[in-house]
Image: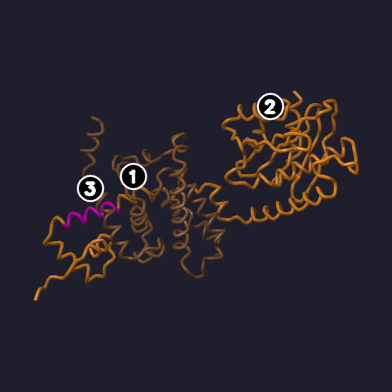
Protein backbone atom coordinates (compact mmCIF):
# COMPACT_ATOMS: atom_id res chain seq x y z
CA UNK A 1 0.00 0.00 0.00
CA UNK A 2 1.46 3.25 -1.10
CA UNK A 3 1.09 6.17 1.25
CA UNK A 4 1.96 8.66 -1.45
CA UNK A 5 -1.02 10.42 -3.01
CA UNK A 6 -1.45 10.72 -6.77
CA UNK A 7 -0.71 14.27 -7.91
CA UNK A 8 -1.73 15.32 -11.40
CA UNK A 9 -0.60 18.26 -13.49
CA UNK A 10 -4.01 19.86 -12.85
CA UNK A 11 -3.32 19.57 -9.11
CA UNK A 12 -0.02 21.37 -9.56
CA UNK A 13 -1.72 24.18 -11.48
CA UNK A 14 -4.39 24.49 -8.82
CA UNK A 15 -1.70 24.44 -6.15
CA UNK A 16 0.14 27.24 -7.95
CA UNK A 17 -3.12 29.18 -7.93
CA UNK A 18 -3.67 28.38 -4.24
CA UNK A 19 -7.02 26.84 -5.05
CA UNK A 20 -6.72 23.52 -3.29
CA UNK A 21 -8.31 22.75 0.02
CA UNK A 22 -6.03 22.59 3.04
CA UNK A 23 -5.84 18.82 3.04
CA UNK A 24 -5.12 18.41 -0.65
CA UNK A 25 -2.72 21.29 -0.51
CA UNK A 26 -0.73 19.54 2.23
CA UNK A 27 -0.60 16.36 0.16
CA UNK A 28 0.75 18.22 -2.86
CA UNK A 29 3.27 19.97 -0.64
CA UNK A 30 4.67 16.72 0.67
CA UNK A 31 4.72 15.34 -2.88
CA UNK A 32 6.70 18.37 -4.02
CA UNK A 33 9.08 18.12 -1.08
CA UNK A 34 10.45 14.95 -2.64
CA UNK A 35 10.71 16.51 -6.10
CA UNK A 36 12.79 19.69 -6.06
CA UNK A 37 12.56 20.27 -9.82
CA UNK A 38 8.79 20.14 -9.80
CA UNK A 39 8.75 22.32 -6.72
CA UNK A 40 10.88 24.88 -8.52
CA UNK A 41 8.55 24.82 -11.52
CA UNK A 42 5.50 25.45 -9.35
CA UNK A 43 7.28 28.27 -7.55
CA UNK A 44 8.10 29.81 -10.93
CA UNK A 45 4.40 29.64 -11.85
CA UNK A 46 3.48 31.50 -8.70
CA UNK A 47 6.06 34.14 -9.44
CA UNK A 48 4.72 34.48 -12.98
CA UNK A 49 1.28 35.13 -11.56
CA UNK A 50 2.63 37.82 -9.28
CA UNK A 51 4.58 39.38 -12.15
CA UNK A 52 1.46 39.39 -14.35
CA UNK A 53 -0.58 41.14 -11.72
CA UNK A 54 2.20 43.62 -11.08
CA UNK A 55 2.38 44.35 -14.80
CA UNK A 56 -1.31 44.83 -15.50
CA UNK A 57 -3.01 45.78 -12.25
CA UNK A 58 -1.96 49.42 -12.75
CA UNK A 59 -4.44 49.53 -15.64
CA UNK A 60 -7.22 49.27 -13.04
CA UNK A 61 -6.19 52.63 -11.63
CA UNK A 62 -6.04 54.43 -14.97
CA UNK A 63 -8.84 56.90 -15.64
CA UNK A 64 -11.45 55.37 -17.90
CA UNK A 65 -11.51 57.02 -21.34
CA UNK A 66 -14.68 58.93 -21.90
CA UNK A 67 -15.69 57.03 -25.02
CA UNK A 68 -15.66 53.78 -23.06
CA UNK A 69 -17.91 55.16 -20.40
CA UNK A 70 -20.18 56.42 -23.14
CA UNK A 71 -20.22 52.98 -24.73
CA UNK A 72 -21.24 51.46 -21.39
CA UNK A 73 -24.12 53.88 -20.93
CA UNK A 74 -25.56 54.31 -24.40
CA UNK A 75 -28.81 55.85 -23.30
CA UNK A 76 -28.24 59.31 -24.71
CA UNK A 77 -27.22 57.84 -28.02
CA UNK A 78 -30.21 55.52 -28.00
CA UNK A 79 -32.28 58.65 -27.63
CA UNK A 80 -30.28 60.17 -30.43
CA UNK A 81 -30.85 57.18 -32.63
CA UNK A 82 -34.54 57.59 -32.04
CA UNK A 83 -34.17 61.23 -33.00
CA UNK A 84 -32.28 60.29 -36.16
CA UNK A 85 -35.06 57.88 -37.04
CA UNK A 86 -37.42 60.81 -36.54
CA UNK A 87 -35.26 62.93 -38.81
CA UNK A 88 -35.16 60.35 -41.52
CA UNK A 89 -38.91 60.00 -41.39
CA UNK A 90 -39.27 63.77 -41.46
CA UNK A 91 -36.82 64.00 -44.33
CA UNK A 92 -38.72 61.40 -46.31
CA UNK A 93 -41.98 63.17 -45.61
CA UNK A 94 -40.62 66.58 -46.59
CA UNK A 95 -39.01 65.04 -49.62
CA UNK A 96 -42.29 63.55 -50.66
CA UNK A 97 -44.14 66.79 -50.03
CA UNK A 98 -41.79 69.29 -51.55
CA UNK A 99 -39.46 67.39 -53.86
CA UNK A 100 -36.45 67.17 -51.60
CA UNK A 101 -33.80 67.03 -54.30
CA UNK A 102 -35.52 68.49 -57.30
CA UNK A 103 -36.65 72.03 -57.82
CA UNK A 104 -40.30 72.27 -57.32
CA UNK A 105 -42.61 75.04 -58.31
CA UNK A 106 -44.49 74.70 -55.06
CA UNK A 107 -41.42 75.61 -53.05
CA UNK A 108 -41.39 79.29 -52.16
CA UNK A 109 -38.48 81.04 -53.78
CA UNK A 110 -36.08 83.52 -52.21
CA UNK A 111 -33.14 83.43 -49.84
CA UNK A 112 -35.28 83.01 -46.77
CA UNK A 113 -36.82 79.73 -47.89
CA UNK A 114 -33.47 78.56 -49.24
CA UNK A 115 -31.80 79.37 -45.96
CA UNK A 116 -34.44 77.43 -44.06
CA UNK A 117 -33.90 74.43 -46.33
CA UNK A 118 -30.17 74.65 -45.67
CA UNK A 119 -30.78 74.80 -41.93
CA UNK A 120 -32.91 71.70 -42.13
CA UNK A 121 -30.29 69.81 -44.08
CA UNK A 122 -27.60 70.95 -41.67
CA UNK A 123 -29.67 69.76 -38.71
CA UNK A 124 -30.20 66.37 -40.33
CA UNK A 125 -26.48 66.07 -41.00
CA UNK A 126 -25.79 66.94 -37.38
CA UNK A 127 -28.29 64.39 -36.07
CA UNK A 128 -26.82 61.75 -38.36
CA UNK A 129 -23.12 62.16 -37.74
CA UNK A 130 -22.62 63.68 -34.31
CA UNK A 131 -23.63 60.52 -32.36
CA UNK A 132 -20.96 58.52 -34.21
CA UNK A 133 -18.37 57.22 -31.76
CA UNK A 134 -15.94 55.52 -34.11
CA UNK A 135 -16.40 57.30 -37.43
CA UNK A 136 -17.73 60.80 -36.84
CA UNK A 137 -15.68 62.23 -39.70
CA UNK A 138 -14.09 61.08 -42.95
CA UNK A 139 -10.85 62.97 -42.47
CA UNK A 140 -9.55 63.75 -39.00
CA UNK A 141 -8.20 67.03 -37.66
CA UNK A 142 -4.71 65.53 -37.72
CA UNK A 143 -4.86 66.02 -41.49
CA UNK A 144 -6.51 69.42 -41.41
CA UNK A 145 -4.56 70.83 -44.34
CA UNK A 146 -5.54 67.94 -46.55
CA UNK A 147 -9.13 68.10 -45.29
CA UNK A 148 -9.52 71.79 -46.09
CA UNK A 149 -7.88 71.49 -49.51
CA UNK A 150 -10.06 68.53 -50.40
CA UNK A 151 -13.32 70.09 -49.23
CA UNK A 152 -12.51 73.43 -50.92
CA UNK A 153 -11.92 71.63 -54.18
CA UNK A 154 -15.12 69.62 -53.99
CA UNK A 155 -17.38 72.36 -52.68
CA UNK A 156 -16.02 74.71 -55.32
CA UNK A 157 -15.12 77.59 -53.06
CA UNK A 158 -12.47 78.21 -50.48
CA UNK A 159 -13.63 76.75 -47.18
CA UNK A 160 -11.66 76.48 -43.98
CA UNK A 161 -12.20 75.19 -40.49
CA UNK A 162 -12.48 78.11 -38.05
CA UNK A 163 -10.57 77.98 -34.77
CA UNK A 164 -13.04 77.63 -31.95
CA UNK A 165 -10.61 76.98 -29.11
CA UNK A 166 -11.71 80.08 -27.23
CA UNK A 167 -15.18 78.53 -27.08
CA UNK A 168 -13.64 75.29 -25.83
CA UNK A 169 -14.34 73.43 -29.06
CA UNK A 170 -11.65 71.63 -31.00
CA UNK A 171 -11.85 70.32 -34.53
CA UNK A 172 -12.59 66.59 -34.84
CA UNK A 173 -12.44 66.60 -38.65
CA UNK A 174 -14.79 66.83 -41.56
CA UNK A 175 -16.67 65.14 -44.31
CA UNK A 176 -18.24 65.79 -47.68
CA UNK A 177 -22.02 65.66 -48.02
CA UNK A 178 -24.44 65.89 -50.92
CA UNK A 179 -26.28 69.22 -50.92
CA UNK A 180 -29.20 70.57 -52.87
CA UNK A 181 -27.06 71.99 -55.64
CA UNK A 182 -23.67 70.38 -55.10
CA UNK A 183 -21.28 69.00 -52.53
CA UNK A 184 -21.27 70.50 -49.05
CA UNK A 185 -18.56 70.57 -46.38
CA UNK A 186 -19.28 69.50 -42.83
CA UNK A 187 -16.80 70.21 -40.04
CA UNK A 188 -17.25 68.67 -36.63
CA UNK A 189 -16.03 70.11 -33.34
CA UNK A 190 -16.05 68.68 -29.88
CA UNK A 191 -15.58 70.04 -26.37
CA UNK A 192 -13.51 68.33 -23.69
CA UNK A 193 -16.78 67.07 -22.22
CA UNK A 194 -17.70 65.46 -25.54
CA UNK A 195 -20.31 68.01 -26.61
CA UNK A 196 -20.38 68.36 -30.35
CA UNK A 197 -21.31 70.90 -32.97
CA UNK A 198 -21.17 70.75 -36.74
CA UNK A 199 -20.53 73.52 -39.22
CA UNK A 200 -22.17 73.07 -42.60
CA UNK A 201 -20.75 75.14 -45.46
CA UNK A 202 -22.08 75.29 -48.99
CA UNK A 203 -21.12 77.41 -51.96
CA UNK A 204 -23.57 80.15 -52.94
CA UNK A 205 -24.06 80.41 -56.67
CA UNK A 206 -25.22 83.99 -56.50
CA UNK A 207 -22.28 85.18 -54.43
CA UNK A 208 -23.76 88.61 -53.68
CA UNK A 209 -26.28 87.95 -50.98
CA UNK A 210 -25.87 88.51 -47.31
CA UNK A 211 -28.37 87.61 -44.66
CA UNK A 212 -28.61 88.11 -40.93
CA UNK A 213 -28.23 85.26 -38.46
CA UNK A 214 -31.34 83.18 -38.31
CA UNK A 215 -32.22 80.61 -35.74
CA UNK A 216 -34.06 77.36 -36.28
CA UNK A 217 -34.77 74.50 -33.96
CA UNK A 218 -35.56 71.20 -35.56
CA UNK A 219 -36.32 68.37 -33.14
CA UNK A 220 -33.59 68.74 -30.52
CA UNK A 221 -31.04 70.38 -32.80
CA UNK A 222 -30.42 74.13 -32.63
CA UNK A 223 -29.23 75.76 -35.84
CA UNK A 224 -27.90 79.23 -36.59
CA UNK A 225 -27.57 79.91 -40.29
CA UNK A 226 -26.60 82.77 -42.52
CA UNK A 227 -25.40 83.53 -46.03
CA UNK A 228 -22.33 85.63 -46.55
CA UNK A 229 -21.55 86.24 -50.23
CA UNK A 230 -19.79 83.10 -51.53
CA UNK A 231 -20.92 80.74 -48.82
CA UNK A 232 -23.93 79.64 -46.87
CA UNK A 233 -23.24 78.57 -43.28
CA UNK A 234 -25.25 76.61 -40.76
CA UNK A 235 -23.94 75.75 -37.33
CA UNK A 236 -25.84 73.02 -35.48
CA UNK A 237 -25.75 71.34 -32.13
CA UNK A 238 -27.96 69.13 -30.03
CA UNK A 239 -25.62 69.53 -27.06
CA UNK A 240 -25.24 73.31 -26.75
CA UNK A 241 -27.78 75.90 -25.62
CA UNK A 242 -29.04 78.53 -28.01
CA UNK A 243 -26.88 81.19 -26.32
CA UNK A 244 -23.73 79.10 -26.46
CA UNK A 245 -24.37 78.31 -30.09
CA UNK A 246 -24.97 81.96 -30.94
CA UNK A 247 -21.68 82.90 -29.33
CA UNK A 248 -19.88 80.33 -31.45
CA UNK A 249 -21.77 81.34 -34.60
CA UNK A 250 -20.58 84.92 -34.00
CA UNK A 251 -17.04 83.65 -33.59
CA UNK A 252 -17.27 81.74 -36.87
CA UNK A 253 -18.78 84.73 -38.66
CA UNK A 254 -15.97 87.01 -37.48
CA UNK A 255 -13.28 84.61 -38.61
CA UNK A 256 -14.75 84.25 -42.08
CA UNK A 257 -15.36 87.95 -42.42
CA UNK A 258 -11.75 88.86 -41.93
CA UNK B 1 -27.67 48.84 -9.43
CA UNK B 2 -28.71 48.60 -13.05
CA UNK B 3 -26.76 46.99 -15.89
CA UNK B 4 -25.31 50.26 -17.15
CA UNK B 5 -23.83 51.08 -13.74
CA UNK B 6 -22.41 47.60 -13.39
CA UNK B 7 -20.96 47.78 -16.89
CA UNK B 8 -19.23 51.04 -16.04
CA UNK B 9 -17.91 49.47 -12.87
CA UNK B 10 -16.43 46.57 -14.82
CA UNK B 11 -14.65 48.73 -17.44
CA UNK B 12 -11.31 48.87 -15.57
CA UNK B 13 -11.23 45.07 -15.38
CA UNK B 14 -12.10 44.72 -19.04
CA UNK B 15 -9.32 47.16 -19.85
CA UNK B 16 -6.78 45.32 -17.74
CA UNK B 17 -7.57 42.02 -19.42
CA UNK B 18 -7.66 43.56 -22.90
CA UNK B 19 -4.31 45.28 -22.36
CA UNK B 20 -2.66 42.01 -21.45
CA UNK B 21 -4.46 40.21 -24.26
CA UNK B 22 -3.70 42.51 -27.19
CA UNK B 23 -0.79 44.55 -25.87
CA UNK B 24 -1.12 48.14 -26.97
CA UNK B 25 -3.43 50.57 -25.31
CA UNK B 26 -5.28 51.77 -28.40
CA UNK B 27 -6.20 48.30 -29.65
CA UNK B 28 -7.07 47.22 -26.13
CA UNK B 29 -9.47 50.12 -25.63
CA UNK B 30 -10.93 49.49 -29.08
CA UNK B 31 -11.60 45.93 -28.01
CA UNK B 32 -13.25 47.13 -24.79
CA UNK B 33 -15.39 49.60 -26.70
CA UNK B 34 -16.51 46.98 -29.21
CA UNK B 35 -17.25 44.66 -26.31
CA UNK B 36 -19.41 47.22 -24.54
CA UNK B 37 -21.29 48.06 -27.72
CA UNK B 38 -21.83 44.40 -28.43
CA UNK B 39 -22.91 43.81 -24.85
CA UNK B 40 -25.61 46.44 -25.21
CA UNK B 41 -26.76 44.99 -28.49
CA UNK B 42 -26.93 41.53 -26.92
CA UNK B 43 -28.13 42.48 -23.46
CA UNK B 44 -31.39 40.64 -24.02
CA UNK B 45 -29.32 37.43 -24.10
CA UNK B 46 -27.89 38.09 -20.67
CA UNK B 47 -29.83 36.33 -17.94
CA UNK B 48 -30.45 38.64 -15.04
CA UNK B 49 -29.13 37.39 -11.76
CA UNK B 50 -26.27 35.49 -13.39
CA UNK B 51 -22.68 36.69 -13.33
CA UNK B 52 -22.53 39.80 -15.52
CA UNK B 53 -18.74 39.84 -15.35
CA UNK B 54 -18.44 36.30 -16.72
CA UNK B 55 -20.93 37.10 -19.44
CA UNK B 56 -19.00 40.24 -20.42
CA UNK B 57 -15.77 38.33 -20.68
CA UNK B 58 -17.53 35.84 -22.93
CA UNK B 59 -18.67 38.72 -25.12
CA UNK B 60 -15.16 40.12 -25.17
CA UNK B 61 -13.71 36.76 -26.06
CA UNK B 62 -16.06 36.44 -29.04
CA UNK B 63 -15.39 39.99 -30.20
CA UNK B 64 -11.65 39.38 -29.94
CA UNK B 65 -11.78 36.10 -31.87
CA UNK B 66 -13.73 37.84 -34.64
CA UNK B 67 -11.28 40.72 -34.67
CA UNK B 68 -8.28 38.45 -34.91
CA UNK B 69 -9.95 36.69 -37.80
CA UNK B 70 -10.65 40.02 -39.52
CA UNK B 71 -7.13 41.29 -38.88
CA UNK B 72 -5.62 38.41 -40.77
CA UNK B 73 -7.38 39.65 -43.88
CA UNK B 74 -6.26 43.24 -43.40
CA UNK B 75 -2.71 42.53 -42.36
CA UNK B 76 -1.26 44.71 -45.11
CA UNK B 77 -3.36 47.62 -43.94
CA UNK B 78 -2.13 47.22 -40.38
CA UNK B 79 1.43 47.41 -41.57
CA UNK B 80 0.85 50.93 -42.80
CA UNK B 81 -0.63 52.16 -39.58
CA UNK B 82 1.64 54.15 -37.30
CA UNK B 83 3.22 52.21 -34.50
CA UNK B 84 0.85 52.63 -31.60
CA UNK B 85 2.11 49.68 -29.66
CA UNK B 86 2.74 50.34 -26.01
CA UNK B 87 3.78 46.79 -25.34
CA UNK B 88 7.45 47.57 -25.23
CA UNK B 89 7.08 50.53 -22.90
CA UNK B 90 4.39 49.16 -20.64
CA UNK B 91 6.55 48.17 -17.75
CA UNK B 92 9.36 50.22 -16.39
CA UNK B 93 11.54 47.31 -15.58
CA UNK B 94 13.15 44.91 -17.96
CA UNK B 95 11.26 42.06 -16.34
CA UNK B 96 7.85 43.51 -17.08
CA UNK B 97 8.83 44.28 -20.64
CA UNK B 98 10.08 40.78 -21.22
CA UNK B 99 7.02 39.32 -19.58
CA UNK B 100 4.83 41.42 -21.79
CA UNK B 101 6.62 40.26 -24.90
CA UNK B 102 6.52 36.66 -23.79
CA UNK B 103 2.76 36.84 -23.25
CA UNK B 104 2.36 38.22 -26.75
CA UNK B 105 4.11 35.14 -28.09
CA UNK B 106 1.70 32.72 -26.47
CA UNK B 107 -1.01 31.24 -28.67
CA UNK B 108 -4.04 33.45 -28.07
CA UNK B 109 -6.23 30.65 -26.69
CA UNK B 110 -3.59 29.86 -24.05
CA UNK B 111 -3.11 33.54 -23.29
CA UNK B 112 -6.84 33.99 -22.67
CA UNK B 113 -6.97 31.12 -20.17
CA UNK B 114 -3.87 32.24 -18.32
CA UNK B 115 -5.08 35.85 -18.04
CA UNK B 116 -8.58 34.97 -16.90
CA UNK B 117 -7.17 32.69 -14.21
CA UNK B 118 -4.35 34.97 -13.12
CA UNK B 119 -5.69 38.51 -13.54
CA UNK B 120 -9.42 37.96 -13.22
CA UNK B 121 -8.95 35.15 -10.71
CA UNK B 122 -11.82 33.28 -12.26
CA UNK B 123 -12.37 29.69 -11.18
CA UNK B 124 -11.42 27.08 -13.76
CA UNK B 125 -15.11 26.31 -14.26
CA UNK B 126 -15.88 30.00 -14.85
CA UNK B 127 -13.10 30.20 -17.43
CA UNK B 128 -14.47 27.08 -19.13
CA UNK B 129 -17.92 28.65 -19.33
CA UNK B 130 -16.61 32.03 -20.46
CA UNK B 131 -14.58 30.55 -23.30
CA UNK B 132 -16.98 27.76 -24.13
CA UNK B 133 -14.44 24.97 -23.62
CA UNK B 134 -14.30 21.95 -21.24
CA UNK B 135 -12.58 22.41 -17.88
CA UNK B 136 -10.02 19.80 -18.89
CA UNK B 137 -9.02 22.00 -21.82
CA UNK B 138 -8.72 24.98 -19.47
CA UNK B 139 -6.29 23.00 -17.34
CA UNK B 140 -4.16 21.82 -20.23
CA UNK B 141 -4.01 25.28 -21.80
CA UNK B 142 -3.13 26.82 -18.47
CA UNK B 143 -0.37 24.29 -17.97
CA UNK B 144 1.06 24.82 -21.46
CA UNK B 145 0.87 28.60 -21.22
CA UNK B 146 2.74 28.64 -17.92
CA UNK B 147 5.38 26.24 -19.04
CA UNK B 148 5.99 28.22 -22.23
CA UNK B 149 6.24 31.48 -20.31
CA UNK B 150 8.59 29.94 -17.80
CA UNK B 151 10.98 28.63 -20.42
CA UNK B 152 10.80 31.92 -22.33
CA UNK B 153 11.64 33.85 -19.20
CA UNK B 154 14.42 31.45 -18.32
CA UNK B 155 15.95 31.73 -21.76
CA UNK B 156 15.44 35.43 -22.18
CA UNK B 157 18.98 36.45 -21.29
CA UNK B 158 20.51 34.20 -23.91
CA UNK B 159 17.82 35.09 -26.45
CA UNK B 160 18.43 38.80 -26.01
CA UNK B 161 22.12 38.37 -26.73
CA UNK B 162 21.36 36.29 -29.80
CA UNK B 163 19.11 39.02 -31.14
CA UNK B 164 21.87 41.59 -30.90
CA UNK B 165 24.25 39.34 -32.82
CA UNK B 166 21.66 38.76 -35.54
> Relative to residue B138, is residue A258 depicted above or below?
above
Give me the chain letter of mark 1. Answer: B
Which residue ends up furthest to the left in the rendered image?
A1
- Identified at 43% across, 44% down, the residue is B72
Residue B14 image position (x, y, % from top left): 45, 54
Residue A241 image position (x, y, % from top left): 73, 45
Q: Which chain is orange?
A: A
In this rendering, position of residue B151 left or right of residue A52: left
- Identified at 44% across, 40% down, the residue is B75
Q: Do labels 3 and 2 share a chain?
A: no
Q: Choose between B47 and B95: the one closer to the eye.
A: B47
Instruction: Please tell me whether mark 1 or mark 3 is closer to you in this view.
Output: 3
Prevailing secondary structure class for the magenta stretch in the rendered image: helix
Residue on which the image places disc 1: B100
The reply to whether discs 3 and 2 touch (Cβ–Cβ < 8 Å) is no
The reply to whether discs 1 and 2 touch (Cβ–Cβ < 8 Å) is no
Residue on which the image places disc 3: B151
In this rendering, position of residue B143 left or right of residue A213: left
Q: Choose between B36 and B106: the one closer to the eye.
A: B106
> Looking at the figure, which quarter contains the N terminus of chain A?
bottom left
Chain B painted colour: brown
> Which element carries disc 3, helix, strand or loop?
helix
- The magenta region covers A38-49
Residue on which the image places disc 2: A153
Label 1 and label 3: CA atoms lie apart by 14 Å
> Looking at the figure, which quarter contains the C terminus of chain A?
top right
Residue A184, numbered circle: none
Image quadrant in which you'd find residue A171: top right
Neighbour class for label 1 at 10 Å: few (<14), some, many (≥20)? many
In this rendering, position of residue A167 left or right of residue B94: right
Amino acid sequence: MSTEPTVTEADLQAYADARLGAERSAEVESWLAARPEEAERVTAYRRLGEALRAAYDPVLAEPVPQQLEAAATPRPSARRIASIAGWIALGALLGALSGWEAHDWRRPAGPLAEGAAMARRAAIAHATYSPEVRHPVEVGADQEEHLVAWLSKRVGTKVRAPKLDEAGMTLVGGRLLPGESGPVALFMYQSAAGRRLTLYIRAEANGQRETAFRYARENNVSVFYWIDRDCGYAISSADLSKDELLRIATLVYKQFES
Amino acid sequence: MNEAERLVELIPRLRRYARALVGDRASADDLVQDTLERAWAKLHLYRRGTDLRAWLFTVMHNVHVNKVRATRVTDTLDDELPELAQRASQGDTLLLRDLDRAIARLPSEQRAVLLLVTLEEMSYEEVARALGIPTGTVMSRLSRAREKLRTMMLGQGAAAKLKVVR
